[in-house]
Image: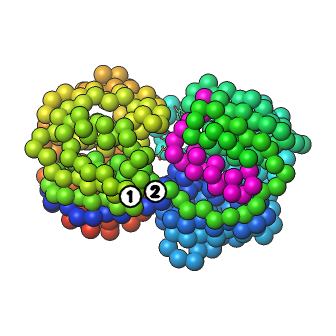
Amino acid sequence: MSQKFIINGGRPIEGAIKVKGAKNAALKVFPLALMTSEPIGISNMPEIEDCYRAEEMLVALGHEVSRSGKGVVEISYKSRTCVNLPPGLVNKFRASIMFVGPLLATCGEVCFPHPGGCVIGAGTRPIDMFLDGFVKMGAKVEVLENSYRLSAKKLKGATIFFPKITVTGTESLMTTACLAEGITILKNCAMEPEIPALAEFLNTMGAKIAGAGTPVIKIEGVKKLRGGNYMLIPDRIETGTFAILAAVANSGEVLIENCNPGHLEALWALFDKIGVNYKLGQNSVKISPTKKILPSNIVTHEYPGFATDLQSPYTVLMTQAHGLSLIHETIHDRRLLFTDMLTQMGANIIMADPHRVVVSGPSKLYARKLISPDLRAGIALVIAALIAEGSTEIDNIYQIERGYEDLVERLTGLGADIKKV
Ligand code: EPU
């Protein structure tokens, strides 16, 4: 039987909460171990299901992964056992695609099924831009019945333009190009903070990457990479989610610690507009209660725009704003479908089309039995349940715990009444 959250809503939310290391940075570091024979140490690692799957992937490929404390992971090379990515793991998380390039670059071939992860795009989320990039670097791609097979005697540097901005696509080709022969230029790259962080670490391993964090990245291939130690940057989506939770609850002061407020400028600009009281510190944010939340439209956008991963918590916030707001989701096709569950809880939300909803607030929310459809919609339902009247049951919480460590403990620390059963 799957585990559930039981949340009794209406408790004041106040106190301090610490942000963990960034999930979407962590998942991109594990595959680097395939590119060096020296050990890699990672600290500030979030203890979440997706990271455990990435660890299992490395073990399946012949590496040793050990822990010397909470959030501290050591990876060392034993022997390469195969070039097939285990389908049972690839199915579990989208970032499993990050293992493809390093295997291709070091073994000359790799087989894998279509990656899994949150069901938030049309059909299965496409990987065409990864495949096109590997082809440009000299790989042969065979599409078999249930898998892809990529092969290349030697990868060569190439100039690659991304027709659409892709975060993991940028990270994957940037990483792979480090071991390709010659120069790779990536154009129209994603600029999320996890990308320069990854490039910085790769450079300490001996890579030659310039321009990460801008739309054009230049990579000069090297023959070998060293090991090294990497401290993950704080999770900006967790930071934003907790800030929005504090604004939704609007019941006390919430101090969010161990974060980098500089990664969330789009959110703070929006808070200015809708009247949320916040104070930014160097590594912290304090949210204080406000008289009235005003409505504001949002359009999700690649970094530094408003993150799609914060759209669902923000939609909950708008159910408490005084007036109408239009939420326009431009990145992932299915990310607004969860709003149907907010409507069941009492929110006044009209779906204009699959990419846009109009929220009319404020609405009182009531407890319901809910199922978490995916990670970010799941946390939005948790936030809604925390202010709803009554006891909400949220099923399928694997989809929430994939991305948030010790959620019950940390929210309980803020005064929430939440239990896992
Ligand atoms: N796309 C293609 N073809 C491709 C790759 C992407 O059409 O080959 C499309 C996608 O379907 C999507 C758009 O391009 O419509 C952007 O997708 P992107 O590749 O940027 O997304 P991603 O790298 O798969 C990462 C995060 C997501 C986050 C997005 C956007 C990781 C592991 N995941 O996904 O995070 O929503 O960037 O910021 O880094 C989450 O943490 O809940 C999550 C889904």
Which residue appears farthest toward the top when viewing the image? 352
Position above or below: 204 against 141:
below
Q: Are marks 2 and 1 in contact (CB under 8 Å)?
A: yes
Q: Which residue is mark 1?
A: 283
Residue 353: tell me if it is visible. yes
Type of amino acid at the residue the image marks with label 2: Pro
Compared with residue 89, is residue 413 higher up or lower down, i.e. above or below?
A: below
Q: Is mark 2 within 8 Å of ligand 1?
A: no
Q: Nearer the viewer, mark 2 or mark 1?
A: 1
Residue sitting at 54 percent across and 48 percent down?
194
Mark 2 burial class by Cα count in 10 Å: few <14, some 14-19, many 20+: many
Q: Quadrant of the C terminus?
A: bottom left
Q: Position of residue 10 (x, y in %)?
A: 14, 56
Residue at left 38%, top 66%? 406
Relative side of 92 to 390, left or right: right
Label 1 is placed on what type of residue? Asn
Q: Is residue 196 magenta?
A: yes
As helix, strand or loop, the secondary structure at mark 1 comes to loop
Numbered range of the magenta stretch: 188-207
* Residue that numbered label 2 is attached to: 234
**Picture layout, residue 72 above or below residue 183:** below
Report if residue 141 lies within the magenta region: no
Mark positioned earlier in the residue sequence (2 or 1):
2
- Residues packed near mark 1 inside 10 Å, few (<14), some (14 to 19) or many (20 plus): some
- Determine the residue located farthest toward the right in the rendered image: 153
Q: Quadrant of residue 209?
A: top right
In-image side of 151 versus 39 (left or right): right
Give the colour scheme shown.
Answer: rainbow
Name the disc covering residue 214, or none.
Answer: none
